[in-house]
Image: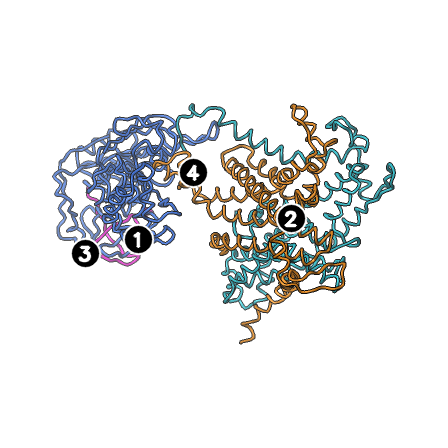
Chain colours: A cyan, B blue, C orange
Amino acid sequence: MRRTNFRRISWIRRVAPYVLLTLWTVIALFPIYWVLVTSLKNPGDVITSPPKFFDFSPTLDNYRVVLGLARYVGLGDIVRVDFIEYLKNSLIIIPLAVVLSLALGLPVAYVMARFRFKGRENLYFFYISLYFMPPILILIPLYLVFIRLRLYDTYLGLILILQLVNLPLVVLIMRSFFEDISPEIEQSALVDGRSRLGVFFKITLPLAMPSLMSTAFLCTIFSWNNFLFGVILSRTRTQPVTVGILAFKSYEAILWGQMAAASIITALPVLILAIFIQRYIVRGLTLGAVKG
Amino acid sequence: MASITLTNVWKIYGKGQNEIEAVTDLSLDVRDGEFLALLGPSGCGKTSTLRMIAGLEDITRGEIYIGSRLVNNFHPSERDIAMVFETYALYQHLSVYDNIAFPLKVRGLKGGEINAVISKVAETLEIGDILKRKPTHLSDGQKQRVSIGRAIVREPSAFLMDEPISHLDLVLRSNMRREIKHLQKDIGITTVYVTHDQLEATTMADRIAVMKLGNLQQLATPQEIFESPTNTFVGSFVGEPPMNFVEVEVQKTTNGMVLKRQDFNVEMSNLAITQALQARTEPRVILGIRPMHIKACASLVEGSMPGSVYVTETLDEYNIITVEIGKQRILVETAPEFCPKPDEIVWLFFPEEKLHFFDLHTGQRICSHRRTGLKGCTNDNEYNRANCVKTINLHLREGAIWPE
Amino acid sequence: MDNKKWYPYMLIIPSIVIVLIIAIYPIVYAFYLSLTDQVLARPITNFVGLRNYINNFTDLQFWQFMKTTAVFVVASVGLQFLIGFGLALLLNMNIRGKYFFRVAMLVPLLIPPITGALMWKIMLDPLTGPINYLLNLVGLPGRSWLADSATALPSVIAIDVWIFTPFVALILLAGLQSIPQTMYEAAAVDGARGWKSFRMVTLPMLRPMIYLVLLFRLAGALTAADTIFATTVGGPNIDTTTLNFAAFKNLFSYGFMGYAASLGITVFIMIFVISQLLISKTRHLWKGA
């Protein structure tokens, strides 16, 4: 839209947005960069003061140690952080949790999208409120309950508790997506003689597949990123990677490089997944309220 | 209250290879208090032109004056114009009252004054009962009136309207046509009205600027455009059902000449026209005639051509018959009683004085027989009766001819 | 025929059962716990009514937690808003490379918060971290950011802002982009330019989105723990211990279940009040389509 004479807009106003955005980009990405660089440094190069930005010879040793492919022989303690165990735990727990939440949540989302029933909006708000529930409030009693039920430090326990995070996502986001699919397609199939169930599996689901995959990825990201549940409800056997990463902290001064490598390893999967859900990020983050 | 003048205005989008000329060297004027319609198909540049007048688009080249002020570099708010948008563009978060009050509030008017003005506007547009509602709770017709209300409340120098009634249903549309025209005459503000509907333009406007692909085709009163279109485009665009065009060859005969194309034969004896046509090097021309000017008879009449009926459409006040003469399809408007069946033979007579001639290659008007002594807006429908063997008065008036 | 009608509703039951088990039941239990004096190490638990809450009222430490929480929430959410809104406005302009900036901006939000906080811990290390080094380059003194009482809370706030500002920016950007261009054009013709246009068109149209973001971020800030866990673990002393984190500490380190539960309930009440206020304001956004 036209404003005043172009010449009157000083060049400052034209350049400022780029400057500001670049500034923020640097702030946002510099830590990642730094940690990446640290992860590629030798132990000697890591704890230099002043810190080295460029002049070091990169090495993949940190990654090797973290992934259990090499043994760390350090000053003093022979310390081993079983990072690979934590990775394994996360890789088992999270996909199972996501699958479970899809199985539990999809029907709810579909029913809410297609059927009108009394209390539908109440149910909707119920799931929303679940999302805003302070985790601490749930974890304190669950800690006791899990111990009693022998769910403490088990895969099943964590899979179950992660439903708290995933179910609202699945129900609310998929409802919004199901509503986007015109019911007429299903109705014409029903008229053709298919059963409701058949319609769901043969027609609705394939149509919803892209959004379903995105929701699944979103749940994976949220579950992977979750820390609190793991730190309280698991101990040595089933700690997910987000908890395990803290193990490096106790050996602060010594294991920077490995901590950095572990950080990169925990951050990488979600960043990759995020690429696939580009289009749905806004809808995902706002639980379907904003279509973005 | 002001006139609007466009001088050699261009609008070009894009750069270099991807340049698009939306408006090409447009010069026109809108007189003070006049209702001017910018008429044309989509992509003709009418909306770009309107937006340049409003200041919502940059003017690539040329000057635009509102009154005596050169407004090229003025912000829309500085041009003293009001605009009615195609999609109404109402402020969703404000009530009807606040929507209409918005331009006044922005200019710093106080509550009391605002109230007085809005009451008057609400009364004029009959929206007094919906003042508290929000746009989402209004019907299209109401939204449109609120949009107009917001425009008139400031008493600007000019109104700019961008297809304001195109999204309304048929009944509402014809109502609003009359309302808007009445309002404009009542308030007397210079108005530029963009539309693609030729009926709107011809019924509402004092003058019409017909545009095509960025170029002005003709700027004239609806009457002039109807009777003397400058080219085939204007001829086909204005007038419903549209003008018939036949490519014919001019051949000399003993009494004058005949226009021929296969089975198509029209004899011409008017001296001036035959001279103008024969003077040209290219023997072929495009013949134009409007459906309502063709006489159709059930039986042979002197000077008429036979054709077979393709289809007959029955409307309330008249019928439209599509007749095939040879490979040509001609539309004819007839009285409702005349209702032949498909494949019947009817005879068509083309009165000389209703013929338009256009250049074959450029489509520009060559000449036409202009009637003098118009008796207001009467139709010569006495000819279009079922049994028109009776009287056919060929009004070969000598009248002035306007060769181009 | 009756059969078919309620068949679909049966499908809802499994998920509700799970939710009952992992959410409703624990919350009720938590309420109960807060009324006891349960400590993990002790075998006997007594029901003490509201004693925990009453004690909190007179407990200096409790009010210290409150203060820390207030500072944390207001500063963190406030900064997220200011910077996020600014970013949204910038990204809404016609800028080349818009897409790149938007993607880059999202990274802090997408990685696990605990990882992000840990990265900052590495960065803020007084001796080996680049932050102090860069500050020294421009003549500013370096500090022990996370160990110094004066800078610990601000540092934690800064990290939280770093992680969550993209969220604000993203949602507000979506809101800005949903405002039709014709609205601005109508406002321009009507006489509103620049700041006036922003105040009278942009802001009002953005209001529901702003409430939505506030809701998410306030709840998020009140229940934040990842950042604190990774960096200061509530320290030094209790300088970075919010109410929420205090509850965690009491569960995690001390086992004061009853006390922890009472703190948790307090946080819950705060979130409840806020969400009641804000959910009603954003109601029409939630209605699905």
Q: Residue at x 15, y 33 (%)?
A: B400
Q: Are marks 4 and 2 on the same chain?
A: yes
Label 4, label 2: how far apart the Cα atoms are: 44 Å
Q: Are marks 3 and 1 on the same chain?
A: yes
Badge 1: chain ID = B
Kindly state the secondary structure of the residue where label 3 is placed: loop
Q: What number is the disc on residue B130?
A: 1
- Callout 1, which amino acid? Ile
Disc 3 to disc 1, C-alpha distance: 53 Å
Q: Which mark is residue C198?
A: 4
Please identify, in this view, whether the residue under mark 4 or under mark 2 is nearer the observer. 2
Percent coordinates x, y for residue A11 in the rendering: 49, 24
The reply to whether the C-beta atoms of the residues labelled 2 and 3 are less than 8 Å apart is no
Inspect the image, locate mark 2, and give the three-letter code of the amino acid beneath it: Gln
> Could you tell me residue B182's position as x and y percent?
21, 45
User: What is the secondary structure assignment of the residue under circle 1?
Assistant: helix
What's the residue type where badge 3 is placed? Ala
- Residue on which disc 3 sits: B386
Region in magenta: B324-351
Residue C187 located within the stretch drawn in magenta: no
